[in-house]
Amino acid sequence: MSQSLTRKLPLIAILFVAAIGTYLLRDKLTFDALAQNREALLAFRDGNYLITALAFVGAYIAIVGFSLPGATIATLTGGFLFGVFPGALFNITGATIGATGIFLAARWGLGEGLSRKLDNAEGPVKKIKAGINENQWSMLFLMRLLPVVPFFLANLIPSFLGVPLHRFVISTFIGIIPGTVVYTSVGAGLGEIFARGETPNLGIIFEPAILLPIIGLSALAALPIVIKALRGKKGV
């Protein structure tokens, strides 16, 4: 087996498990499944809190690491079982570790070679790569803060651009805090929602009271890019 193929095996395994998991779990990790099993989950948590917490974080890592369906339901479950805190911390930790797994697999398999090719490129490609490198922190935070960037792509893109591991981990952990706290808080209120026979409002993150502060944080993250652009124009 060639070294090139060996390096790609972790990423191939992730894609394979993701495809199988999407087919097998698409109807399993749902809000209805959570509603039907809520009493059993609460009873198990009450009798085995530490095991439940560890198992939950492990399951969240697997869901994110293999890009399985059900990440939103998992976030709600974290709030339902553990409250806003430590539920949000469990969710953020699981998501960050799972995302880091994808990042490392993609960089080991494809990212390093692709990053070198981009570094050696000429013309517009080289300018784009240089611009991203100059604003890595801002770009990483923007990808996490803005809900328009799919989480899976936000894990892959940095690996292809040669982003250092520590920057990826820090920006992921901090950048997903706002959105994760919002959905965890929704999960923490699921008891009342179950009692009323309703479903949670998963579009809450797009409501002005939630979205505007996130946009404000995104603007703050983008500020260094704007300042550098303005300085560049003045220097022209």
Image (cartoon, rainbow, N blue to C red):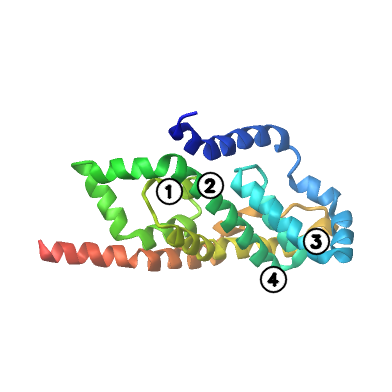
Residue 50 in the image: state x and y as whole percent: 79, 65
Q: Is residue 151 visible?
A: yes
Q: Which residue is mark 4?
A: 85
Amino acid type of the residue that numbered disc 1 sits on in the rendered structure? Ser
User: Disc 1 or 4, which lies upstream in sequence?
Assistant: 4
| Contact? badges 1 and 4 (CB < 8 Å) | no
Single out the mark in the foreground, 1 or 4: 1
Task: Count neighbours of disc 3 (C-alpha within 10 A) and say few if under 14, some if 14 to 19, many if 20 or more.
Answer: few
Residue ID for mark 2 = 102
**Rendered-image quadrant of the C terminus:** bottom left
Q: CA distance from mark 3 to mark 4?
A: 17 Å
Disc 1 or 3, which lies upstream in sequence? 3
Q: Compare residues 9 and 182 and report the one nearer the observer.
A: 9
Amino acid at circle 2: Ile
Q: Are marks 2 and 1 in contact (CB under 8 Å)?
A: yes
- Residue type indicated by callout 4: Phe
Residue at 65% x, 42% y is 69
Dot 2 or dot 4: first in sequence order is 4
Q: Residue at x 26, y 48 (%)?
A: 128
Q: Give the number of the disc on residue 51.
A: 3
